[in-house]
Image (spheres, helix red, strand yellow):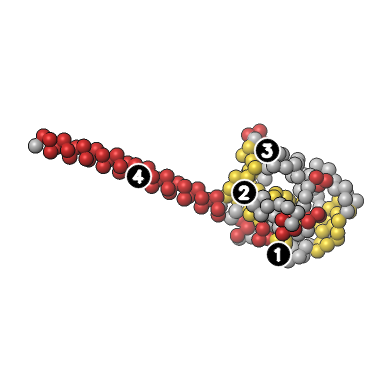
Amino acid sequence: MTSEKQDLADSSGQSGFWKSQRENFQILAIALTLALFIRAFVAEPRFIPSDSMVPTLLVGDRLVVEKLSYRWHSPETGDIVVFDPPLQLQTQGYSKEQAFIKRIIGLPGQIVQVQQGKVYVDNQPLKEPYIAEPPAYEWGPRQVPEGQFFVMGDNRNNSNDSHIWGFLPKQNIIGRAWWRFWPFSRIGQF
């Protein structure tokens, strides 16, 4: 009888170990599924690799891109958006997976023009306290087509943006830059 009780204790200890491992695996699977869901549909971290958005975003900044708000409303002038490169950029050799980040300047139907160091939207000068320096080029006037946007980098003279490759289709927008979490000295919401 003693040996029978010992066999039961050994097997129940072993099944307790495997039960614990199965529970750990289930928790891990749920956490991984939740993380993948959040990254695909809610928000994702991004790294800034270039200086096209200086002084707003510096090389090495890390931010959270939220993906939900544009399901309920359209992007607005001044929003900083992350997007997949449109066909015009892909023909320049950029990969479909290489995301870009720029500021929305012109909305569908608006007329955008860059003239004498100022950006004009519908013949009104755009107030741009966030730019590094005024643009040293001329562009437009052109009307933004329906379903597209005119985007520019804040570093106006060092940005591969709509003044070079054209308008950004709405379906290319991944999300809105929402929160900088690195470096800690510049942490905050946009």
Q: Badge 2: few (under 14), some or many (20 or more) residues near its Cα, within 10 Å?
A: many
Residue type at numbered disc 2: Val
Q: Is residue 10 left or right of residue 46?
A: left
Mark closest to the chain's N terminus, 4 or 2: 4
Q: Verify CB contact (< 8 Å) between mark 4 and mark 2.
A: no
Q: Earlier in the sequence, mark 3 or mark 1?
A: 3
Image quadrant assignment for residue 188? top right
For mark 2, what is the residue? 65
The CA span between labels 3 and 1 is 31 Å
**Tag of residue 23:** 4
The answer for how far apart the CA atoms under marks 1 and 4 are is: 48 Å
Local crowd size for mark 4, using a 10 Å CA cut-off: few (<14), some (14–19), many (≥20): few
Residue drawn at x 58%, y 48% is: 44
Camera-side mark, 3 or 2 = 3
Say whether disc 1 or disc 4 marks the residue closer to the N-terminus. Answer: 4
Which mark is first along the chain, 3 or 4? 4
Mark 2 / mark 1, whichever is N-terminal: 2
Is 11 left, or right, of 155 in this rendering? left
Q: Pinpoint residue 14: horizontal percent, then vertical percent.
A: 26, 39
Reply above or below: 14 against 39: above
Query: What element does badge 2 sit on?
Result: strand
Residue 38 in view: yes
Q: CA distance from mark 3 to mark 2?
A: 15 Å
Of the pair 4 and 119, the residue shown nearer to us: 4
